[in-house]
Amino acid sequence: MSGDAARRRGAIVPPLRTFVGEYMKLVKSLSFLLPACVLAMTLFATSSHAQDADKIVRAMSDYLANAKTLSLTYDTDIEVITPDVQKLQFASSGQVLLNRPNQLRATRVGGYANVELVFDGNTLTMFGRNIDAVAQVQAKGSVDQLVQRLRDEFSIALPGADFLLSNSYDELMIGVRDLKHIGRGVIDGVECEHLAFRTEDADWQLWVEVGAKPIPRKYIITSKGVAAAPQYTLRVKEFRTNADLAADAFAFKVPASAKKVDITALSDLDEVPHGIIQGDKK
């Protein structure tokens, strides 16, 4: 959800050396597949170019920044490791509507929370539908400023927030010390460039749509600082740029039944439920 790797975590991924070693054993045992296997290894070796990866991320960032409006739907999966080392995954879905420079509407619905965030350039409203509670704060400024304030002041991370910023390239590349263009893959029937990046505390992957619309289609962050390497996965579904917006697209009418609360009371409405992931050793 953000440039902060601590908010985007992921699953067990074997070291590349181990994968290649086991792969070569398989090649030897299945010699009739050798031409195809050699081709696959060659494609992997020749596609890992840092310059290509950097160019693709820049093109994606420029495309997103130049769009006046963005509209998308998404699915997310976040993994956690319990005290007794059991891996659990929690899923949610939502929508994002952005009108640059200072209007945003985002929803997230999961098994444990139903949250809506609305920003009209002056006021930030957060509504917890599942608990019928609303918080509002003055937040005059741009979407870039809002995202930063949500992270720093309220510890709230929007799904895919890095892609909503006007400088997504700069945000994504913070701390990157290794980048590769792995090749191509297909996400929901869409051909994408497959990129891989490494920072000190996380590895992350990005699939960007091939062609004139370099849209981010899938994003995975794998934690290297947590045992069992949990992952955070964001999959972008429907994506539109420069769409016509309704006049009330960023208006919010507070339900009469909603309790007025401080925004910190809603910051815990996360994708991971609290209190149900404790180890139960028998």
Image (tube, rainbow, N blue to C red):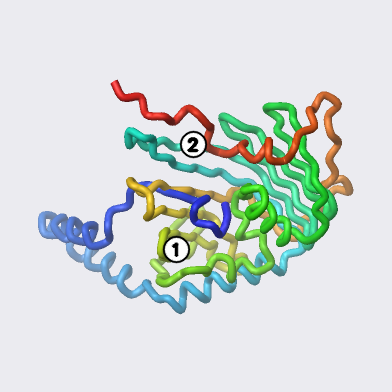
Circle 1 Cα neighbour tier, 10 Å, few/some/many (<14 / 14–19 / ≥20): many
**Residue displayed at 59% across by 53% down:** 160
Residue furthest out toward the right: 247
Residue furthest out toward the top: 282
**Residue displayed at 41% across by 35% down:** 88
Of residues 11 and 193, the one drawn nearer to the viewer in this rendering = 11
Q: Where's the C terminus, which quadrant?
A: top left
Mark nearer the N terminus (1 vs 2): 2
Q: Quadrant of residue 201?
A: bottom left
Of residues 106 and 223, the one drawn nearer to the viewer in this rendering = 223
Where residue 35 appears, x then y in whole percent?
20, 66
**In the image: residue 245, left or right of residue 155:** right
**Residue displayed at 59% across by 71% down:** 170
Residue under numbered circle 2: 90
Residue 258's place in the image compared with 6, above or below, is above
Q: Quadrant of residue 161?
A: bottom right
**In the image: residue 110, left or right of residue 35:** right
Residue 188 in view of the camera: no
Q: Secondary structure at mark 1?
A: strand
Residue under numbered circle 1: 194
Where residue 131 appears, x then y in whole percent?
69, 27
Where residue 235 appears, x then y in whole percent?
53, 49
Q: What amino acid does circle 1 point to? A: His
Q: What amino acid does circle 2 point to? A: Phe
Q: CA distance from mark 1 to mark 2?
A: 25 Å
Closer to the eye: label 1 or 2? 2
Q: Secondary structure at mark 2?
A: strand
